[in-house]
């Protein structure tokens, strides 16, 4: 089975990597796809997020990285994916994801499959990482080692340039 794991990945975290690794063992193919929403301002540029995900998935032959603009269901169909993969961390995630899953099912017939992040991964979020990095605190507990220092430097540089204007 081929699935799409969509997200904003601003930045990718240990929580995201934990889901990708598990998915790579469960499914034949996994497409990690960055959704581009022109209305949503991200801290990291698309190219940076793609590069970070490429680095993280280098040793996973059945995982590819991509991006899409527009409807997720349309992208999934174009890539002949049979399902959408999302993770459920909290009750708030459940409420939101239930709506997305139902809409995607109605619009395209695609099922959404869910994985629960284990233990410490449940409380990681990209916005938390952005806040910590911008304050100059270490993000290593939350971001995979392979990209942690580059993510930290990039986010700190963004924060400095935002404040110099
Ligand atoms: N580990 C760590 N963090 C996780 C996580 C995990 N396993 N799973 C989710 N998160 C966090 C993210 O870091 C992010 O945190 P933040 O809000 O603090 O930054 C948050 O959960 C939600 O982000 P994300 O998973 O990127 O979802 P999103 O709500 O931004 O949605 C898309 C992204 C691409 C899936 C969504 O915008 C989409 O489907 N777009 C296409 C448009 C479309 O088809 N619309 C109709 C669908 S109903």
Image (cartoon, rainbow, N blue to C red):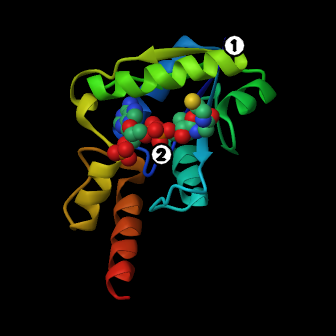
Q: Mark 1 and ligand 1: say if the CB distance to the nearest ligand atom is below 8 Å.
A: no
Q: Residue at x 41, y 17 (%)?
A: 115
Mark 1 element type: loop
- Of the numbered discs 1 and 2, the one sitting upstream in the chain is 2
Assign the C terminus to one quadrant of the image. bottom left
Crowd band around label 1 with a 10 angstrom C-alpha radius: few (<14), some (14–19), many (20+): some
Q: Which residue is mark 2?
A: 9
- Residue 124, compared with residue 151, is above or below; it is above
In the foreground, 63 or 11: 11
Direction from residue 117 to residue 54 in the image, left or right: right
Q: Is residue 107 above or below residue 144?
A: above
Percent position (x, y) of residue 36? 61, 49
Foreground: disc 1 or disc 2: 1
CA distance for labels 1 and 2: 25 Å
Tell me where residue 38 appears, x and y as whole percent.
Answer: 61, 56
Image quadrant where residue 67 sits: top right
Residue visible at 31% across and 26% down in the picture: 89
Label drawn at residue 109: 1
Residue 133 showing in the rendered view: yes
Vertical side of 74 occupied by 49: above or below: below
Kindly identify which numbered label has been placed on residue 17: none
Task: Classify mark 2 as within 8 Å of ligand 1 or not, answering yes or no.
Answer: yes
Residue nearest the viewer, comparing 122 with 145? 122
At horizontal 53% and vertical 20% (from top left) the residue drawn is 101
Q: Is residue 59 among the parts visible in the rendering? A: no
Which quadrant does the N terminus fall into?
top right
- Residue 128 or residue 107, whichever sits in front: 107
């Amino acid at each position: 089975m081929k699935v799409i794991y969509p997200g904003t990945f601003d930045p990718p975290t240990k929580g995201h990597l934990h889901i990708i690794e598990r998915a790579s063992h469960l499914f034949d193919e996994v497409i990690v796809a960055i959704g581009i929403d022109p209305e949503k301002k991200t801290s990291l540029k698309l190219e940076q997020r793609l590069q970070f995900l490429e680095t993280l998935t280098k040793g996973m032959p059945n995982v590819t990285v991509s991006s899409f603009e527009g409807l997720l269901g349309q992208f999934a169909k174009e890539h002949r994916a049979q399902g959408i993969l999302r993770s459920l961390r909290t009750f708030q995630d459940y409420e939101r994801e239930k709506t997305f899953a139902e809409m995607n099912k109605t619009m395209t017939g695609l099922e959404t499959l869910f994985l629960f992040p284990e233990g410490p991964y449940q409380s990681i979020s990209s916005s938390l990482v952005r806040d910590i990095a911008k304050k100059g605190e270490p993000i290593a507990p939350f971001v995979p080692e392979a990209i942690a220092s580059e993510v930290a430097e990039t986010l700190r540089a963004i924060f400095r340039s935002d404040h110099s204007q």
